[in-house]
Amino acid sequence: MTPDDKAFLAGLFDAAVAAADPVQALRPHLPARPKGRVVVIGAGKGAAQLAAAFEDLWEGPVEGVVVTRYGYAAPCRHIRVVEAAHPVPDAAGLAASAALMQAVSNLTPDDLVVALVCGGGSALLPMPADGLTLQDEQDLNAALLASGAPIGVMNAIRKHVSGIKGGRLALAAHPAKVVTLVVSDVPGDDPAEVASGPTVPSRVTLEETLAMIGNRGIALPPAITAHLARGQGAPRPDDPRLAGHEVRVIASARLSLEAAAARAEAAGIPAVILSDAIEGEARDVGLVHAAIAREVAARGRPFAAPVVILSGGETTVTLRGSGGGRGGRNTEFLLSFAGAIDGQDGIVAMAADTDGIDGSEDNAGAFADGTSAARMRAAGVDPVAALQGNDAWGAFHAAGDIFAPGPTGTNVNDFRAILIRQA
């Protein structure tokens, strides 16, 4: 793997992130000025950057509060920025949820609430429903993260045990109008799924959610199971208090992948986008991508080399190792990919989370080629054992192929780029 290959792939990542730049994403979607107050609320890994961009673009008084992950804050003049834990919620998140609910209380029909919502908001907005505690929400998040369930299933469960998600924050703003501006990090770009939809009601009923839990055999904490059995579901989309609200997706994986493809083609490398909505076990998705890459390299099908294959979405990781794992879904995807192209020439890849942090460590992802597995073994790390133990970070750190750009200020989920230089 040459420095030029790494620079090329990192440049595609940069193009994808730039396409979700908060100022550029917000500019065409600013709402009309109301007669009354403008209150900005928000949650997610890029919420502070969105709030700062909104202040720069908005002409007139503005107030409000947003919550983001520790270390992701950005300075705002009028909007309060608070930080909390991700991916397992903490007491700071509990206080932040209360602050958002307070910010939208006692409003009038002349007031406007602008909700800036992006990925990561589910963990940042803990507010246990009646009869539950913060510990119950923490136990739920830990169980969901270890379950390997798709993000849509996780969010459906979260919405029915929360006091703020699934549209409840929008209900608290009634009778003010709510305009929700979403940076989507979910496959399919359903705004009700981003951050578990604090201002967007769920279309998945409690009965449907219970069926998903049973069909997948998801083990939930007893307190959560008992709450769901009591039948207190999330608000429905036809609730009259939500009438007149607006929801707009202002940035997404699709737009970012298209920007990366344009960057590659400007450099003279054709690009294809497999999908912006790939889900499934990260290690399994890695094997499928590797099979496609090998087919291109060996037989020139289904694409002719040279080519860059791009994909996005949100894979999942089922924890199998006793140590809990180091890394995240993008790094695990790439470790599986690296093992499947072991010894193969002409293939170089990267996988990274567009928010800049992939799971438990400080990297966004990593780089890999046909020599990665051998270099891991030379450094004393068995890549097969590392994959079995969910220690993708340890394997790529040993090989010197970690990609760590730091927090990016946005989040449109997984970014994968595979460069194939020869057929």
Image (spheres, grey):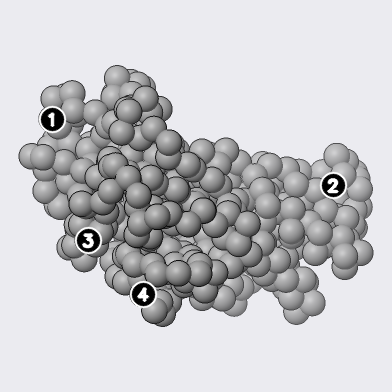
Q: How many marks?
A: 4
Task: Say which amino acid is labelled 2.
Answer: Val
Residue neighbourhood size for the residue with mark 1, other residues' Cα within 10 Å, grouped as few (<14), some (14–19), many (≥20): few
Residue 107 is situated, as x and y percent measured from the top left of the image, at 26, 51
Q: Is residue 247 above or below residue 256?
A: above
Residue 114 is situated, as x and y percent measured from the top left of the image, at 41, 55
State which tag comes first along the sequence, 3 or 2.
Answer: 3
Dot 1: what SS?
helix
State which tag comes first along the sequence, 4 or 1.
Answer: 4
Q: Which mark's residue is nearer the viewer, 3 or 2? A: 3
Residue placed under numbered mark 2 in the picture = 296
* Res. 99 mark: 3
Task: Say which amino acid is labelled 3.
Answer: Ala
* Res. 78 mark: 4
Q: Which mark's residue is nearer the viewer, 1 or 2? A: 1
Residue placed under numbered mark 1 in the picture = 226
Residue 73 is situated, as x and y percent measured from the top left of the image, at 39, 74
State which tag comes first along the sequence, 2 or 4.
Answer: 4
State which tag comes first along the sequence, 3 or 4.
Answer: 4
